[in-house]
Image (cartoon, grey):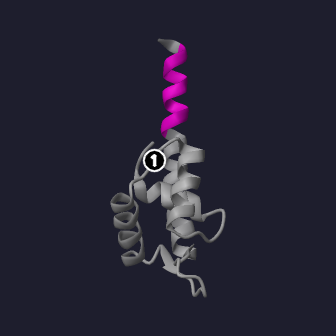
Amino acid sequence: MSDPALLVLASLAEGDKHGYAMMEDIAQFAGVRLGPGTLYGAITRLEEQKWIRPVASDDRRRPYRITAEGRAHLSEILQQLDAVVKAGLRRLKHA
């Protein structure tokens, strides 16, 4: 699984993070290392969709937060993926 937007949403579902913290979190839980261009491209698209938003900070790094709409979207995508995984596992048992 390497969809950058999905990985960013999954990372932010745990709590607010800035870009580098997201990159490290994603590398840890998904085994995928996103480059800065890929990460910030996904962040821009997610902001445009209103699925994440920046959070005020005194630090130079800008943290992001998943919105209620983003949580709903992530939940829907994860349910779809779960259905695919379950079907694939069932089919493997019969192969």
Residue 60 seen in this snapshot: yes
Quadrant housing the N terminus: top left
* Residue behind mark 1: 33
Question: Residue 81 location in percent, x, y?
Answer: 49, 44
- Please report the residue visible at 42 percent of the width from the left and 52 percent of the height from the top: 34
Q: Position of residue 18 (x, y in %)?
A: 54, 70
Three-letter amino acid code of the residue under disc 1: Arg
Residue lying furthest front in this view? Answer: 60
Q: Tell me which residue sits at (46%, 56%) in the image.
A: 6
User: Which residues are drawn in magenta?
Assistant: 84-93
Neighbour class for label 1 at 10 Å: few (<14), some, many (≥20)? some
Can you give x and y, in whole percent of width and height, for residue 7 in the image? 49, 54
- Above or below for 2 versus 89: below
The residue sitting at the right extreme is 14
| Total numbered labels | 1
* Residue 88: in magenta span: yes
Query: Image height check: is 35 above or below 1?
Result: below
Looking at the rendering, which quadrant does residue 90 occupy?
top right
Residue toward you, 81 or 35: 35
Taking the spot 33% from the left edge, 61% from the top edge, the residue there is 37
Between 53 and 34, the residue placed more toward the observer is 34
Q: Is residue 59 above or below residue 34?
A: below
Instruction: Judge left or right: residue 25 versus residue 33.
Output: right
Which secondary structure lies at badge 1?
Answer: loop
